[in-house]
Amino acid sequence: MVRLVLALVVLALPAPALADAVVATQTLRPGTRITAQMVAVDPAQDSAITNPEDVIGQEARVLVSKGRAIPPEALAAPTLVARNQIVTLVYRKSALRIETEGRALTAGGAGQIVRVMNNSSRATVAGRIAPDGSVIVEQN
């Protein structure tokens, strides 16, 4: 009798509500830029990401298997500057603007800070990546 009552109580409890989840339609390897064909919405899974537009254009940081929900920590801004890539270093202050070439010592996306070696002076500086791929160096 107790088992029957317990079973009825368990059946009467509401099931957790699942929201739509954005899932990978193919295996996403680290560094892959995600396109619309690589993702789909699955109402049977739960995830923090429910809108495919939040994923499209991002880059996978870790491996995401086919059919799995894509967690937010698996995504990063697309890499604009690769390690060892030649970039334009830009120094701006008021009306002064100086541009030179440098070699990126680390990779990064728009808005991220990377270390760059000035090709002329061999000095290492840090700068923020601009949306056009140049590196803006600011003086403290």
Image (tube, rainbow, N blue to C red):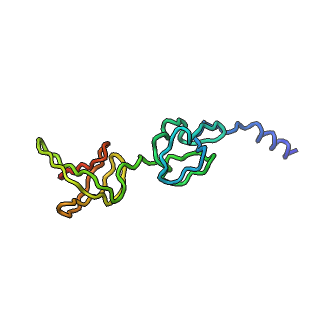
Residue 91, image x, y percentages: 18, 49
Viewer-nearest residue: 46 or 40 = 40
Question: Which residue lies most toward the right here?
Answer: 1
Is 137 placed left or right of 30 in the picture? left
Viewer-nearest residue: 4 or 120 = 120
Residue 17, image x, y percentages: 65, 36
| Image point (31%, 52%), residue name | 113
Is 100 placed left or right of 81 in the picture? left
Question: Which residue lies most toward the left here?
Answer: 95
Viewer-nearest residue: 8 or 70 = 70
Q: How many labels sit on residues? A: 0
| Image point (30%, 57%), residue name | 104
25 in relation to 51, above or below: below
| Image point (30%, 48%), residue name | 129
44 in relation to 60, above or below: above
Residue 13, image x, y percentages: 72, 38
Is 134 placed left or right of 93 in the picture? right
Question: Which residue lies most toward the bottom here?
Answer: 122
103 in relation to 23, above or below: below
Image-quadrant location for residue 19 = top right
| Image point (55%, 46%), residue name | 70
The N terminus: image quadrant: top right
Image-quadrant location for residue 126 = bottom left
